[in-house]
Amino acid sequence: MKKISNVKVSTIDKGITSVLIDDASSYNSLSSVTLKSLLTVFKNLNKDNITKVIIIEGSGKGFSAGHNLKELKSYKKKKDYQKLFNLCSDLMMEIVDGRKPVIAKVHGSAYAAGCQLVASCDLVLSTDDAKFATPGVNIGLFCSTPMVAVSRKVSKKRMMKMLLTGEPIDAITAKEFGLINDFYPKEKLHDEVLSLARTIASKSNLTIKLGKRAFYKQAEMPLKKAYKFTSKVMTENMMAMDAKEGISAFVEKRKPNWKDK
């Protein structure tokens, strides 16, 4: 296990890496120190050739309460706030633009920037008692950066209600809204997350990398442009050794031998 500040990184299975925000005393708040550590960790994992799937979770009672309010209160200059919010945005973009699929394993609460972190992940599984919120309005600080990620998962009317009221939603509602994939009893969450991660890790890493990048890029494009772009991606994918191997394995009714090439 490696530790960068209050972020622990460990291999929990072949090709599967766990990233643990280990700052339970602040409910795993996304302080500038934690954000820098997470950004460094994700950059390193996205570059390595061993990790195929990343799981991110929080220690203690919950996932993350969002930005550290004591830190925000201590700032005096505009540039300090700008630096912090830019750093947070950089982390979210590293997760979205990164080569590796990221699964959020959520228990307890995921609020504000913590909810933003959840929404930025590719997949999300939570406990059945988890809570999600963009509650900034309650303290006079509208969740403007968190809404960027969350509004790309949740419809506008539902998002606006979360933003304008600051009220939390439960796991059932979060699944209905499209913020999470599914929820489970606390004692089953780890096994469900690991099972999902193993399924993804069994695929061609090259194919997953190409597909993840294309998914997010095409989502922001007009329909015609998206089809033109993804046709090029499919062509690039088809030229890869793994595509040829996968098709051959299917035809020959055998398990593919991925080369990630």
Image (cartoon, rainbow, N blue to C red):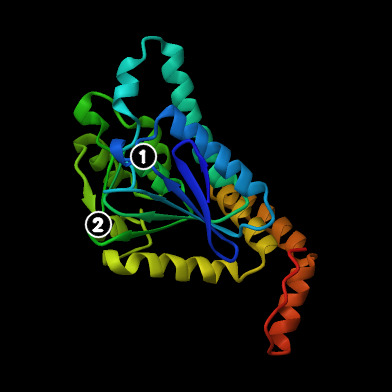
- Residue 112 in percent (x, y) is at 32, 37
Position of the C terminus, as image quadrant, is bottom right
Of callouts 1 and 2, which one flags the residue occurring earlier in the amino acid sequence?
1
- View extreme (bottom): residue: 253
- Residue 223 in percent (x, y) is at 57, 52
Q: Residue at x 51, y 32 (%)?
A: 36
- View extreme (top): residue: 77
Residue to which mark 2 is pinned: 173
- View extreme (front): residue: 1
- Residue 100 in percent (x, y) is at 59, 54
Q: Residues within 10 Å of mark 2 (few under 14, many from 20)?
A: some
Drawn side of residue 238 relative to residue 136, left or right? right
How many numbered discs?
A: 2
- Residue 207 visible somewhere in the drawing: yes
What is the three-letter code of the residue carrying label 2?
Thr
Drawn side of residue 87 relative to residue 144, left or right? right
Q: Residue at x 32, y 69 (%)?
A: 188
Which of these two is toward me, 150 or 199?
199
Which of these two is toward me, 168 or 46?
46
Please state which of the two labelled residues, at mark 1 or mark 2, is closer to the viewer: 1
- Residue 135 in percent (x, y) is at 24, 36
Above or below, 17 against 148 in this view is below
Which of these two is toward me, 120 or 155?
120
Q: CA distance from mark 1 to mark 2?
A: 27 Å
Q: Residues within 10 Å of mark 1 (few under 14, many from 20)?
A: some
Secondary structure under tag 2 reads helix
Above or below, 229 against 194 in this view is above
Q: Residue at x 39, y 34 (%)?
A: 30
What is the three-letter code of the residue carrying label 1?
Asp
Residue to which mark 1 is pinned: 23
Q: Residue at x 73, y 64 (%)?
A: 260
